[in-house]
Amino acid sequence: MSYWIVLLVSLLACSVGFHMYIWFFSVGYGLSIAVIGAALAIGFHSVMALPEWIACILLFVYGLRLGGYLLLREIKSAAYRKVLSPEMERSKKMPIAAKLALWATCGLLYTLMTIPLFFRLKNGAEPDAMLWSGLAVMACGVVLEAVADLQKTAAKRKNSRRFVDSGLYRFVRCPNYLGELLLWLGMLLTGTTALRGPWQWLFAMLGFILITWVMFSGARRLELRQDKNYGADPEYQRYVKSVPIIIPFVPLYSVKKYKFLVA
């Protein structure tokens, strides 16, 4: 199976972003990861062992759940539709050339993020302890993000005007982003003993570095939006000064001052 096929299916899945450009990063992101997981399973099914099947299934389940969750949130949540309204107007005015650039960039990014598993399968590496370790970290990330999304939905249903500080949000302000980072760290680990040569290492590391930047960039946007919505609330001020933004137990409480995270 060729890398170009993986890129093609990623581009096809995230093409939903042409409906609204924000979907390149949301619904299209989830769909792309799901179809990449399916494509790898189909393309390498004859050489895959149990742990590689598990990795592909994790990608498929993760992507399908995330894409479905984001789509349903957009359909059902009036508050979220209000947040997206300016983006919808911006999408209508965005030149097609800009959308094409976003489409190509996202399609390439999603393939780079999954490339450690692709190289493991392509290189015919035998399952080892590092592969199983990576799968464990991936599974933790998938579960953590799913639970965080459920807890946020439940909290917002109870009080849509209050910030969320219950459940996992007591320990870190963006537990869903932490789940994402664990998923892709696990993906990187699955390939570390199978990567061959500097180019494979470069592509694998590039994918992880870029998604890490994307997650911190997303945390910055969320922080600015929450400051605008809840900044006058003393409880919110205490919360943001005592709970780390993404990484638990690491005293990083704010990223809004870091301009290099602007996307």
Image: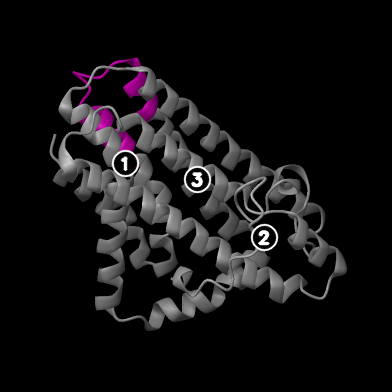
Amino acid residing under circle 3: Glu
Amino acid residing under circle 2: Tyr
Asked whether 43 falls inside the magenta stretch, the response is: yes
Between residue 112 and residue 9, name the one nearer to us. 112
Q: Find numbered disc 3 in the image and state the secondary structure of the residue it sits on.
A: helix
Q: Find numbered disc 1 in the image and state the secondary structure of the residue it sits on.
A: helix
The range drawn in magenta is 35-56
| Gap in angstroms between the C-alphas marked 1 and 3 | 13 Å
Give residue 114's mark: 1
Residue 186 lies in quadrant: top left
Between residue 191 and residue 230, name the one nearer to us. 191
Residue highlighted by disc 3: 180
Residue at horizontal 39 percent and vertical 69 percent from the top:
21
Residue 67 is left or right of residue 207, and the answer is: right
> Which image quarter holds the N terminus?
top left
Q: Measured from the top left, where is residue 222 in percent x and y? A: 61, 65
Determine the main secondary structure of the stretch shown in magenta.
Answer: helix
Residue 115 lies in quadrant: top left
Foreground disc of the pair 2, 3? 2
Between residue 65 and residue 50, name the one nearer to us. 50
Is residue 34 visible in this depiction of the protein?
Answer: yes
Residue 24 lies in quadrant: bottom left
Residue 40 is left or right of residue 181, and the answer is: left
Foreground disc of the pair 1, 2? 2
Callout 3 crowding tier (Cα within 10 Å): few <14, some 14–19, many ≥20: many
Residue highlighted by disc 2: 253
**Sequence-wise, which precedes: disc 1 or disc 3?**
1
| Gap in angstroms between the C-alphas marked 2 and 3 | 19 Å
Residue at horizontal 44 percent and vertical 59 percent from the top:
214
Judge whether 156 appears above or below 63 on screen: below
Q: Measured from the top left, where is residue 44 in percent x and y? A: 20, 26
Amino acid residing under circle 1: Thr
